[in-house]
Image (spheres, rainbow, N blue to C red):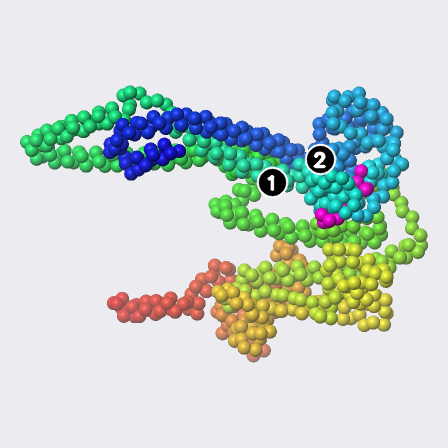
Amino acid sequence: MRTLAALRAESEGQEPPAWPRDPIAMDALIDAARPQASAALAKVIERRDAAIAQRHQLEEEVRDLQRRLDHARTGRVRLEEPTAQLMTTLEREGMRPRALCQVAEVLDEGWREAAEAFFARDREAIIVDAGHAARAVEILRAGRDTFRGCRVANTRRLAALPIQAAQGTLACVLASDDPLAMAFIVFRAGQVELAETQSALLAGGRAIMRDGAYNSGIVVEVLRTRDMKIGRAAVPLMEQGLRRQISDLTSLIETHRGIERFHEDIAKRLEGLAQPAEEADRLDRLAIDIAGLDERRTQLQLRLDRISTMVDPALRTALESLKAQREAVNQDKQELVEMRGGLQRDAAEALRILGGGQDLVGSRACLRHRWAGFRDRVRNRAQLALLRSTYRGRGSRQLAPFVRELEQSANQAKEDHRICEGEIRQAHGHYRLLDEGAPVIQPNQVVTVIKPWVTSGIEALETNELIQYRRQAEEAARQVVRIFRTAFIHELNARFNTLRTEIDLLNRALKTRPLHNEIYSLHFRPKEAFSPLYRLARESEENETLLDLLFDPSAGGGAHAEAVAEVERLLGDPSLDFSAYQDYRGYFDFDLRMEDVTNGRLTSYDRRRGVASGAERQVPYYVIIGAALASIYHGTRQQYDRPDLGLGLAVFDEAFSKMDGPNQRTLLDFYSHIGLQVVIAAPSEKRSVVYENLDSIVDVFRHENMVTAETARIKPHARAEMRAANPQHLSETELGDLLAQRDIQQAGGQP
């Protein structure tokens, strides 16, 4: 390093031919650095090769993770190959083999990591019926080389073991409908306590923490597993974990690739320094040659100067022109060289991207991965045709707005999914009143719990042809009472959802139609007297176990005690006046709010009502009238297409009298969007406003006792031209230009 520092100090600020100042000393420094360069070259190459080896190892790990990810996308838990082969062999023997991970479920996801790590190889323990246990062991022993690492549970003993897991043990976080599997779980984990803290971990015997820290009674270790296998939820969790590992390893590969390039560059430089220089290439010889060439160039320049004094001035001018052209050509050449360097860097970057991993957009691996995903999702010509028509439907529009439209459609689909999930939960709640054996679902468990349960129920109905349940008379009576009481809560929730949907539809229509440079929105909140009942109804939609409070007097009600008592009083006291509870809209206070488009200032109608101008008072009035009429006529059907809504007549006498033209048009467009057909009675002086905004005009004329009527239909183009010709809609600048033009015309065209 000292030699290299000396070389750098001697070369500081110099370029050939001024470099080097002392060729002999510089040759000596280079000769002194050559052995060190040779020694360092071996270390650099060793580090480069180590980086290459580590990169290859990481790439192999990524390929293995990718294979596991591809298998996870199939939706099935991946069993080891020997285990799968043994299960196939047992099936051919007429047995019903199943792996523990296939018939068990994790009840508490917070303990999944601990359960997966604790059972480890036992997750693939094969369970057969007790009568087949001996034969299964014989097959395992006979194929000990083929079925290496496989395990067969001793179900003859498990059949006599308990299947109830004690609370507070690792076994209680797992469940299975297979009694043999449950007995295996209790046998293996029934004595392992769940520890939330390290103190609890070390307090007694065997215990385990959520992060996998396990106390065997003598030794504490941290158990780990690289994949998830237990239950139906393991596949999506494993897929997420594999994607995260692939992303981390891909980033690490890029880091090693950078280290590899760095050491490769250093190695090339050291190779040049380590090679001995030829005698003709030594700096002292080159310096002498350069000095001789400089002297000869000076002499030739002197001769050229003498000759140039005798040259014709025209030739001298031509020579100067050629020199200028040569300088321009050299400059262009330098620009092209720099451009070539930039293009080479761009090409190298493009090659790097093309050779990147599947998470790097633009790489071949990313293209293959996304193409495989596309092929996996688009499986037939019908789906491809639908996708092609959707993409071509954007026409000449930019891709970004088209993507936003698709995102809006996706958000609408999500909203529809939310509504559908609510309907499923409501139907499931009604069904649980008839069958207490139906599973209890938590939020976001409709697909993972309800769908498998419904599928298994359909299969049971199809295979058993007819399933009959017998009920005792008192049980039937109890169920009838239960249905009657919970139907009240479910009906309230349905109507609350209807109200929320109507408000959302109206707010979406108002959001895109500012009035007086303000965006109007409707809001509602439960009244204080109905707030406990509202909270009970809404929370019971997410947690159906709250409805059990209506039928268990000993439960006390907890936070919902007041609401539970009110429901019991409503349904049990025949003398109570029920009229206040019949209209669910009376449960809420409603408010109309206005947000200024320019500064975002928010105010309410109650606050503005006493100080607003005539038009500012009229606009909220007409917004509220339109919302009320749309709710009465259509309700939640406002989301349907306009032709499907039917009649929604709104009749006004001299409507919008204090509003300007743009606000009138915006309000009429809002009425049309929410499915209302507007009829306005107005005197003849309002004819311009009517012509600009309505499509059908009926003029009524009265003469003494005779009345006649004439009908005209104004098309959109005519309405637009009328609005353009109305000076009321012109700005001050436009009005001034129009008056100036008229003055010029009156003056005979003279400015």
442 or 53: nearer the eye?
53
Up the image or down, 65 lies above or below 416; here it is above
Q: Amino acid at mark 2?
A: Val
Q: Quadrant of the C terminus?
A: bottom left
Q: Which residues are magenta?
A: 188-200
Asked where in the image residue 497 lies, by quadrant, the reply is: bottom right
**SS at badge 1:** helix
Can you see residue 313? yes
**Which mark's residue is nearer the viewer, 1 or 2?**
1
Indicate yes or no whether the magenta region holds residue 323: no
Residue furthest toward the bottom? 704
Up the image or down, 543 lies above or below 103; here it is below
The residue depicted at 48 percent of the width and 45 percent of the height is: 396
The residue depicted at 77 percent of the width and 47 percent of the height is: 203
Q: Quadrant of the N terminus?
A: top left
Asked if residue 306 lies left or right of residue 260, the reply is: left
Q: What residue is shown with label 2?
A: 77
Up the image or down, 718 lies above or below 527; here it is above
Residue 671 pos. (x, y %): 58, 63
